[in-house]
Amino acid sequence: MQTKQMNKFRVVETRICPTCNNTFDADKNLTHCPVDSSLLCPVNAGYTGQTVAGWNILDLIGEGSSGRVYKAQHGSSAAVAAIKFLKLNLQSDPTAVKRFQQEALAIKELSNASITALFDFGIMDDGTPYLIMEFVEGQTLQTILEQQGALSDDSIRTMFIQAAEAMDDAHSRGILHRDLKPGNIIVDSKKNVKILDFGLAKFCDTEIAASVTRTGLHLGTPAYMSPEQCTGGDLDNRSDIYSLGCVIYECLTGKQIFDTDKAVAFYHKHAFEDPIAPSKHFGKSSHVSTKSFKQLEELIMACLQKHPDDRVQSMGELADGLKGKQIRVRHKRQLMKLGPRRLTLAALIAGVLIGACFLLIQNNPPLQSSKPLAFTPPHAVTTSKTQRQFFAPRGLFLLINMEESAQTGFKDGSSIYRESDENNLREAMNSAAARECFTAWHDWYANIFAYLRANHGTAAPQNVRMKINVVVDRGGQVSANTEWSDPVSDAASQAFIDEFLASVQKLDGSALMRFPSSATDSVSFEIFLGPNSELKVEQSNQALR
């Protein structure tokens, strides 16, 4: 069979570090990056020039986090298609494979001119899943925005009437997209729209949805995620409406809904901050006073309400609004005006009421889950060029509390606190410098947590309990000692302890240990291993400044 010819081309030419992006030759037999100890990812040699199910693969036309897309031509005709292959490093991940299969099932269920059609789905002899889809000429909306900036009202209405009607069709069949963004919308020269990438699609009330979707897990692209996505809530069609509202907002203003480039900041802002009205981006420009602009602005803001009940309720209603029809403006509930200091998290409220003075700033709200959650670190490693001297208000201290266990999943209770002068704490928290400093240090600890997790931190035997004190100096030198450890009698537990301690020592001198602040001399934190595969990183008294 022709597909069997692919086996000899499935060679790993290089391995890449997801943290520092350095590449290494496969013949060096490295599994971890020698610079920062991150697990290396294999890079596939590619499929150009090969044949799959009668399609001759021509060129690589795109690549995302989960797959590579090639242009292909059918051997017996002039027909062209796009073939998407699941990346090699994800083929051993059952969840990634299920999501790939789910994309095929979602597209197969749909027959809409504005959604890419599926021709075939299969698995090659070497185990690589693939999708053969309609090839679409045109540019992604992301490329158009990068080249042109803000688009005209008429262009926006023409394109998004099609997108809304297509998604209304998907919703009517019980399919949510969950990753609507400019990069997943293609526009041709006649402004015809195609929606791509249903890889995160959710089938409402089906077993496959439950098998690949875990409560509290962040799925999607941070700049376009709904508040309920950011906080791990239940999703319905109105989550897609919020996401599409973010895309329309960007097309109208040329700017993303919130001015930040950090995922954790997007989560916070989507959940608790109101976006600036599009008209505010244009100053005194005359076109913002036109009836068309005002109606479009009102429609966008109706899509962007925090509570799903306050939004436009269906994609069909959104399409009608884009056609100029009047939509019902819903009452915006007072709950939507609450700031981050009034998070409706019982533990946080209780802490405030008893005077603990904790405040969550630009951070994931603590997640509750009945299963372990996948945790994605920031990955951004500090360099000498990116180090800063932060001038946050004095008297602020960092509280880091990141933990994960087999029972509760990943939880992050990190915040800032002040030991004295509590009345001025709220004012101090409004300081942009304090927020920036907190975020930088939070990301630093998140990278350490992710490293420890990758090095067996969540695979501890049930009887292992220990606490490790770690001190890091400005040069990235690490000193670690075991404060206490329960005695173990079995060889497997002792081997785990030795291996885990060795992984901590590997942090010594690595790029992960470079401080975000050039003014900091040393930091200390604690690592705790406990029953039920518990891993915890804590720091309770580091001065923020």
Image (cartoon, helix red, strand yellow):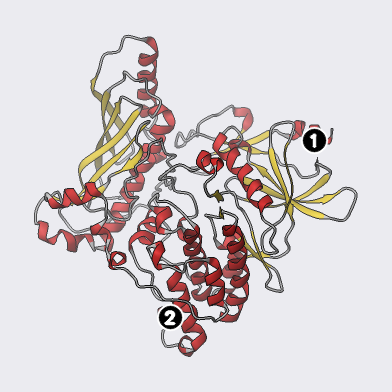
Compared with 209, 248 (above or below) is: below
Locate residue 93: give its quadrant: top right
Spatial distance from mark 2 to mark 1, Cα to Cα? 55 Å
Residue occupying image coordinates x 60% and y 81%: 154
Q: Which residue is drawn at 26% across and 37% down?
A: 538
Tag count? 2
Label 1 crowding class (10 Å Cα cut-off): few <14, some 14-19, many 20+? some
* Labelled disc at residue 103: none
Name the residue tied to disc 1: 3
In the drawing, does residue 169 fall left or right of residue 232?
A: right
- Secondary structure category for the residue under label 1: helix
Q: Which amino acid does label 2 sit on?
A: Ser
Task: Decide which of 216, 268 is in the foreground and name it.
Answer: 216
- Check the image and name the residue furthest to the right: 76
- Residue that carries the numbered disc 2 in the rendered image: 279
How would you rate the neighbour count of disc 2 (Cα within 10 Å): few for under 14, some for 14-19, many for 20 or more?
some
